[in-house]
Image (cartoon, helix red, strand yellow):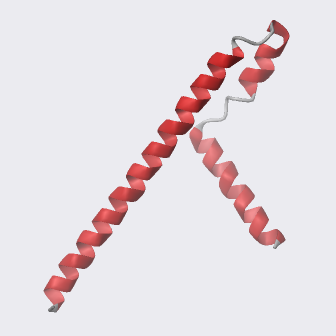
Amino acid sequence: MNRVQNRKIRNRLIVLVSCLVLLSNCSNRAIYESLRRANLQECEQQPIALIEACQESNRMSYDEYRRELERLAIEQRQAN
Protein backbone atom coordinates (compact mmCIF):
# COMPACT_ATOMS: atom_id res chain seq x y z
CA MET A 1 0.00 0.00 0.00
CA ASN A 2 1.15 3.51 -0.58
CA ARG A 3 1.20 6.40 1.87
CA VAL A 4 -2.11 7.86 0.72
CA GLN A 5 -3.92 4.56 1.26
CA ASN A 6 -2.26 4.08 4.67
CA ARG A 7 -3.30 7.58 5.71
CA LYS A 8 -6.90 6.99 4.61
CA ILE A 9 -7.07 3.71 6.50
CA ARG A 10 -5.55 5.29 9.61
CA ASN A 11 -7.99 8.23 9.45
CA ARG A 12 -10.94 5.86 9.07
CA LEU A 13 -9.76 3.84 12.07
CA ILE A 14 -9.42 6.99 14.15
CA VAL A 15 -12.96 8.05 13.24
CA LEU A 16 -14.30 4.56 13.97
CA VAL A 17 -12.60 4.32 17.36
CA SER A 18 -13.75 7.84 18.26
CA CYS A 19 -17.35 6.95 17.39
CA LEU A 20 -17.18 3.77 19.43
CA VAL A 21 -15.85 5.65 22.44
CA LEU A 22 -18.58 8.28 22.16
CA LEU A 23 -21.32 5.65 21.77
CA SER A 24 -19.96 3.68 24.68
CA ASN A 25 -19.99 6.78 26.87
CA CYS A 26 -23.57 7.58 25.87
CA SER A 27 -24.64 4.03 26.64
CA ASN A 28 -22.93 4.09 30.03
CA ARG A 29 -24.58 7.41 30.86
CA ALA A 30 -28.01 6.12 29.81
CA ILE A 31 -27.62 2.95 31.88
CA TYR A 32 -26.44 4.90 34.92
CA GLU A 33 -29.29 7.41 34.68
CA SER A 34 -31.86 4.66 34.16
CA LEU A 35 -30.66 2.79 37.24
CA ARG A 36 -30.56 6.01 39.25
CA ARG A 37 -34.15 6.83 38.32
CA ALA A 38 -35.26 3.30 39.21
CA ASN A 39 -33.52 3.59 42.58
CA LEU A 40 -35.20 6.94 43.24
CA GLN A 41 -38.59 5.37 42.48
CA GLU A 42 -37.81 2.57 44.92
CA CYS A 43 -37.02 5.20 47.54
CA GLU A 44 -40.68 6.18 47.45
CA GLN A 45 -41.55 2.70 48.72
CA GLN A 46 -39.39 3.11 51.83
CA PRO A 47 -40.79 4.12 55.21
CA ILE A 48 -41.17 7.90 55.45
CA ALA A 49 -38.25 8.20 57.86
CA LEU A 50 -35.89 6.60 55.29
CA ILE A 51 -37.04 8.28 52.06
CA GLU A 52 -34.80 11.34 52.33
CA ALA A 53 -31.66 9.33 53.09
CA CYS A 54 -32.46 6.95 50.24
CA GLN A 55 -32.95 9.83 47.80
CA GLU A 56 -29.74 11.49 48.96
CA SER A 57 -27.77 8.32 48.28
CA ASN A 58 -29.02 8.39 44.67
CA ARG A 59 -28.45 12.06 43.82
CA MET A 60 -24.97 11.73 42.28
CA SER A 61 -25.06 12.70 38.58
CA TYR A 62 -23.25 10.61 35.99
CA ASP A 63 -20.54 13.28 35.66
CA GLU A 64 -20.01 13.30 39.43
CA TYR A 65 -19.91 9.51 39.41
CA ARG A 66 -17.24 9.47 36.67
CA ARG A 67 -15.11 12.04 38.52
CA GLU A 68 -15.35 10.02 41.73
CA LEU A 69 -14.49 6.82 39.90
CA GLU A 70 -11.42 8.48 38.35
CA ARG A 71 -10.35 9.87 41.74
CA LEU A 72 -10.60 6.44 43.34
CA ALA A 73 -8.65 4.84 40.49
CA ILE A 74 -5.84 7.39 40.95
CA GLU A 75 -5.78 6.76 44.70
CA GLN A 76 -5.61 3.02 44.12
CA ARG A 77 -2.70 3.37 41.66
CA GLN A 78 -0.82 5.58 44.12
CA ALA A 79 -1.37 3.09 46.93
CA ASN A 80 0.13 0.26 44.86
Q: Where does residue 59 sit, x and y in percent of width and height? A: 67, 29
Q: Which image quadrant: the C terminus?
A: bottom right
Q: Where does residue 1 sit, x and y in percent of width and height? A: 15, 91
Image point 66% across, 57% down: which residue? 70
Q: Is residue 46 above or below residue 20?
A: above
Q: Where does residue 55 sit, x and y in percent of width and height? A: 72, 22
Left or right of 5? Residue 72 is right
Quadrant assignment, res 64 = top right
Left or right of 76? Residue 13 is left
Image point 80% across, 21% down: which residue? 53
Left or right of 27? Residue 56 is right
Residue extending farthest bottom: 2
How many callouts does the rendering have? 0
Residue extending farthest top: 48
Quadrant assignment, res 6 = bottom left
Q: Is residue 40 above or below residue 4?
A: above
Q: Where does residue 63 sit, x and y in percent of width and height? A: 58, 43
Image point 53% across, 30% down: which residue? 34
Quadrant assignment, res 33 = top right
Image point 29% across, 65% down: which residue? 15
Q: Is residue 45 above or below residue 14?
A: above
